[in-house]
Image: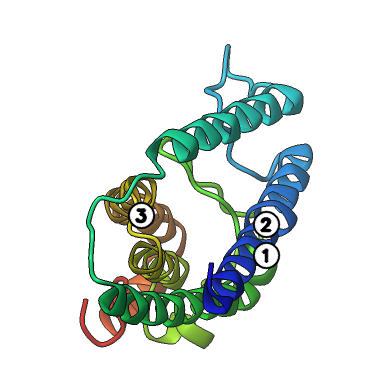
Amino acid sequence: MTPFDWLAAVIVLTTFIYLGFVLTLKEWFDGLRKGQAVTLLPARSGRDMPVWANLAAALVLLGLAGLMTYYLWIPFIHVTTTASVVLAVVGLVAYLVGLWFVLWARRTLGKYWGLSSSRQVKLLDDHLLIQNGPFAWVRHPMYSGWCMCMVGLTLLYPVWMILVLLISCLVAFPARAHREESALAERFGDQWNAYKARTKFMIPFVY
C-alpha cells in the first residue's frame, strides 16, 4: 500500500467508527431507552420490543454486514494504475465533502436528530422544523451527505460491497425522506408547505 492508501484507510475507518458507533448507535441506544427512537423490530400487542432485543438485532445486522464485506470485497472494474490514483483522490475528496455535509446537518439538528426506518418516523413532542444551516438549501442534507460519501467510497474502493451499499442508499434514502416529509407535513402544516416550496429535496439548487 502507498502512503496515500494508508492515509485514506485511516480517514475512512476513523470516521466510520465515529459516525457509526460513537455517534449513531450510541444516540440511537439512548433514544431507545427514553422511548424516543425508532425500533428495528416490529411491535407486538401494541408494545415496542425491549431495548435488549433491538440491540441484539443491531448486532446481528452488523455481523451480516461484516460477512458481506468479507465476501464482496471484490473489484467490479479494473482500471489502469494512473486512473486508479485519480479516482482514489477524487473519491477521497468527495467522501470528505459528503462527511462534512453529514456532520454539519447533524450538528444543526441537535436534539431533533433521529433515525427513521422502513416502518417508523418519530418526532419529539416539542419538535421544531429546522430551516437553518444546510436545511436552508435542502430538506434532507444528511441523506445528501451520505450519498456523496458512498459515491466517494465507490471511486476510492471500486468493489462490489461498496457498490451494493451505494445502490442501497440511492434506493432507501429517498423513500425514507418521503416518509419523513409526510410526518413533518402532518405536524407543521402550512409552515412545512412554505419551507418545502423554497428548498430542494436532496441536491442543492438542483433537485
The quarter holding residue 147 reads: bottom left
Q: Is residue 5 at all visible to an observer of this figure?
A: yes
Q: Estimate the spatial distance between the alpha carbons at disc 3 and disc 1, rounded to whole Å.
A: 23 Å
Q: Earlier in the sequence, mark 2 or mark 3?
A: 2
Q: Nearer the viewer, residue 84 or 156?
A: 84
Q: Secondary structure at mark 3?
A: helix
In this rendering, position of residue 70 left or right of residue 194: right
Q: Residue at x 67, y 57 (%)?
A: 17
Q: Are marks 3 and 1 in contact (CB under 8 Å)?
A: no
Residue at numbered disc 1 = 14
Mark drawn on residue 17: 2
Amino acid under disc 1: Thr
The vertical placement of 121 against 127, above or below, is above
Q: Secondary structure at mark 1?
A: helix
Mark in the foreground, 2 or 3: 2
The C terminus sits in image quarter: bottom left
Mark in the foreground, 3 or 1: 1
Amino acid under disc 3: Phe
Indicate the position of residue 34 as horizontal and vertical percent values: 77, 42
Q: Nearer the viewer, residue 99 or 81?
A: 81
